[in-house]
Amino acid sequence: MKKQLLILIFVLCSVLSINAQVSSINPNTGLRGQTLTTTITMSAGLMSTSTPPLFGNDIYLQQGGTIIYGSVTNWPSYFDWTLMRNVYADSGSVSFTIPGNAPFGLYDVNVNVYPFSTPVLYTLPNGFLVGGAAGKIGGHLFFDANQNGINDVGELPVGNQRILFTPGNNIAFTNPNGDFRYYADTGVWTADYQPSPTFMQTTVPLTYTDTVPPSVIGRDFGTYSSSHTYDNASYVVRTRYRCNESSRLLIELKNLGFLPVRHVATITTNNFPFISSTIPPDVINGNSRTWIVPSLGGGASEFVGGIMFYGAPGPWTYVEVYLTDSIFDMSGNLLEVLSDTYISEVRCSYDPNDKHVSPEGVLAQKYTPIASPLTYHINFQNTGNDTAYDVSILDTLDSDLDLATFQVLGSSHELSTQMTVNGEVRFNFFTIMLPDSGTDEPGSHGWVTYRISPKSGLADPTQITNTSYILFDLNPAVVTNTTLNTMTALQYPDASFNTVDQSICETDCIVFDNQSTSGTSYQWIFQGGTPSSSTASAPGAICYSTAGAYDVTLITTNALGSDTMTQLAYLNVGASPGVFSVVQMGDSLIAPQGYNSYQWYYNNVIISGATSYFYVATQDGDYGVVVGNANGCQSGVNVPNVIIGVNDISLSNAISIYPNPSTGSFEISFNTTGNHDLKIQLFDKVGQLVKEQSIQSVSGNNKIAMLNDELSAGIYMLRIKSNSAVATKMVVIN
């Protein structure tokens, strides 16, 4: 029974170990032509039931079709008397000889072990880095302004141009100083300038052919372009932010063209306060600071603000940095507006060797617009105890990135850059002499920034990842974090709305036009409105009953996130004139004075020119008036069934009053066709009788003097009345 149990345990352990991996290899970096001894460590406990690599092909490094075999020099073991066999340690020594022509780059570490007679293969993917070179080929690329094939005094360097090296079809890039360096294996190499679109080569020979070793310099090329005059870049250098510590912020502006330009760069930060900058800002507005660079020459760059110092953010918050850079030609014409956003979580501890990408994307999937260029920023720091003579960074670009769009934007130190046809990029900071952090902490940092675009026609969605490997001299490679962007055609939501008018009146309703893009759901908030909220894309008419200034908010959402637009005091609701009445005095209709506008109507039709506060009716019917106040708001009232006076006392002419207006005394003149008993009445504007006089008319013309010194200034209505008829006339007393 005990024997069966031991067998069962042995089989179970063997099955489980199949999922184990190679834990590590140390050192994990070697140079071409070098023989070195490494320590390979397997998963804990794996070797207690296995035999180590036995044969010459049991352990090897592999990159594609290139295999470098190793040999076990020592794998410790002891004899277990209980199991009656040797038990091997988890680690052993393995020696590798790296060929001088081994390709640069990362290699898988493959190990065969023997739990039974059949070997089981375990792999540490990309566990070993091969570097080194037999020599270098270098030169300079210049803008040949006069196209004479000679690098004349004052002719500018040209960066980010490609020099093709064969065999292998690898690329070396010119740095901002126009220099390139290619680190080559032993052999014969050809250097060939590959002009970017709109550029052409002006120098001969067209190519250079050299044998390495030794190293070769002076392989210069001239180039010219008649159209590539403006090319600019602006970006936030990805500095690190730690809780409870002040931080530095760098913004670099670059002129990649050949004509000078003017920059107006604005930095806006959240969550941490501005302290100072080595170059004071030209404009300060809240948490935004603006620097004006009046002229930045072709090929030049500038860190605006110099070094900006910011106070410590609170722990576990996010630092938000927004850059907007408006670029003008020297005549003041706007060329373009560039922007960059850096949002990073503040950590109380961090790996000083890290990688960032912009745009970072949103949500856990890091959704990013599918056509967005990606800007990568790699930070490194020498945290050892001695100066680093050389620093190299290996970056294997994702297969969904377009290698033709690769462009180095900037670096902390002089840099040479190489790229293989399969997208392996090597950033070389040779003889950087980077001090260690214990000796010179500010000087122990370095960085490089580059930009590259996704390939066109990617599936939606497509994930793009990126990891870098940083080498300080011959020490094991430091592996950065892995960035992620999920490229999608889905756009970030953009909240926007509009109305025909932003001023309405009490009791009015208004319709809001949703002008948002890329939204799938909406949330409206109407302060003071009815309804006060809505989730409809088009919420319909919103009514306002009380005068005031009201905010309107629209939140637009899709799978990428939300965007909010709040317009403060967007809608102005004016007070209406309110309720009023019209007084009829004979044929005259009188509305209250004091309004800004009046318009009279007859049978719901506008009476042209009837824009006074009173109107004398000329025929029977329905009348109305609409008044307006200073807000432009209106109210109206109807006066139905107006009947004007009948002149059956045979007033042969209209009543005449002279003078009118008067100071209080005036004369009334009218004609009659007989003798009549008449009453002459005077009413004020509210219809109160203020004076009355009885007379008897004579046939023909009648004149009556009215002395009214006791009347105050205003509008009055004069009425002449018989037993069967009435006639009216308005009187104005000043």
Image: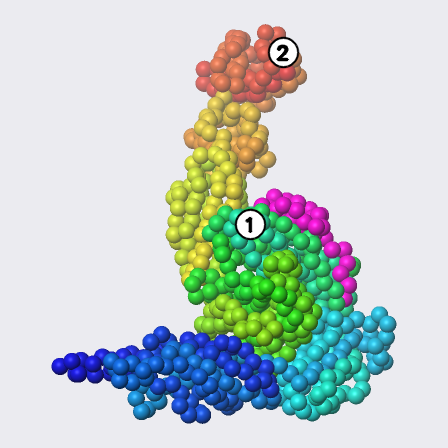
Mark positioned earlier in the residue sequence (2 or 1)? 1
Question: Vertically, is 532 above or below 253?
Answer: above
Q: Is residue 664 left or right of residue 546?
A: right
Q: Which residues are magenta?
A: 273-298
Q: Quadrant of residue 115?
A: bottom left
Q: Is residue 404 left or right of residue 19?
A: right
Return the residue nearer the eye: 191 or 476: 476
User: Which residue is denoted by mark 1 in the rendering?
Assistant: 245
Which residue is located at x 61 percent, y 73 percent? 473
The amino acid type found where label 2 is placed reads: Gly
Report the magenta stretch's main SS.
strand
Q: Secondary structure at mark 1?
A: loop
What is the x, y in percent for residue 374?
56, 68
What is the x, y in percent for residue 716?
56, 17
What is the x, y in percent for residue 227?
75, 73
Return the residue nearer the eye: 183 or 369: 183
User: Which residue is denoted by mark 2 in the rendering?
Assistant: 664
Q: Is residue 338 visible?
A: no
Question: Vertically, is 198 above or below 550?
Answer: below
Which residue is located at x 42 percent, y 30 percent? 641
Looking at the rendered image, the disc whose residue lies closer to the viewer, 2 or 1, is 1
What is the x, y in percent for residue 184?
66, 85
